[in-house]
Image (cartoon, rainbow, N blue to C red):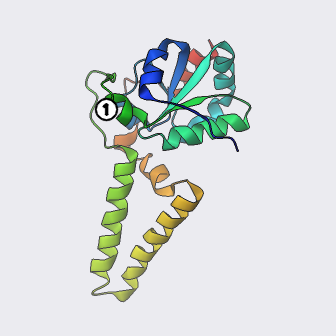
Amino acid sequence: MISPASLSPFEAAARLEEFTVIDVRAPGEYASGHVPGALNIPLDRLPEAVPALKSASARGSLLMVCASGVRSTRACEILADADIDAATLAGGTSAWEGDGNGLERPAGARATWPMERQVRFAAGSLVVAGLVAGRRLPAARWLSAGIGAGLVYSAVTNTCGMAAALARLPHNRAPHQAAGLDATLDALQG
């Protein structure tokens, strides 16, 4: 598979008006700060958005964004399989903000940890819990082994089941006043 085009924050900022920007992070992450004008379509909902994204790509270029560039690269691969060209923001919103570009933050939005940080915290906590519990109940060490195996599988397949599960937690969902996926898809249909 051909790697998607990758734009640096500087390149993307200079051409931002040319793009329909799609942020593929969880709604809670999106609400804590996103590239100006970005629309939110979580990565796990991307397949149902393909028709609307095909329509939007016919009118102009798509720029996929996440926190670090990993999920947006995966989004570009999914779109490429549907014959939709899209570029990814190298380094994601972290690099965007680090380059001195501002993020839009809706009024009243709460800060949510980036998904990668949530996964590291959850995985580390479960490994420690398995090891501590294993002092009394040796079979509990299998929890640590299972988490370790899951992390290896995640690295090999470039997917993350733990992130998918964490994305469904209440703090990672969109605030009540945020536009839902249906409104976003309608906007993309133009």
Residue in the picture at 65% in, 20% down: 57
**Residue 31 lies in quadrant:** top left
Instruction: Give the side of residue 105 with respect to residue 168, left or right.
Output: left
Q: Is residue 175 visible?
A: no
Residue in the picture at 44% in, 70% down: 148
Q: Nearer the viewer, residue 190 or 158?
A: 158
Which quarter of the figure is the N terminus placed in? top right
Residue in the picture at 64% in, 16% down: 189
Q: Residue 91: image x %, image y %?
A: 43, 37
Q: Residue 22: image x %, image y %?
A: 52, 27
- Circle 1 — which element? helix
Up-down relation of residue 18 to residue 103 (above or below) = above
Name the residue carrying label 1: 98
Instruction: Give the side of residue 177 with respect to residue 85, left or right.
Output: left
Q: Is residue 131 visible?
A: yes
Which quarter of the figure is the C terminus placed in? top right
Instruction: Give the side of residue 92 with respect to residue 62, left or right.
Output: left
Kindly identify the amino acid type of the residue bearing the numbered disc 1: Gly
**Residue 107 lies in quadrant:** top left
Q: Nearer the viewer, residue 80 or 160?
A: 80
Up-down relation of residue 45 to residue 140 (above or below) = above
Dot 1, crowdedness within 10 Å: few (<14), some or many (≥20)? few
Image label count: 1
Q: Residue 62: image x %, image y %?
A: 58, 23
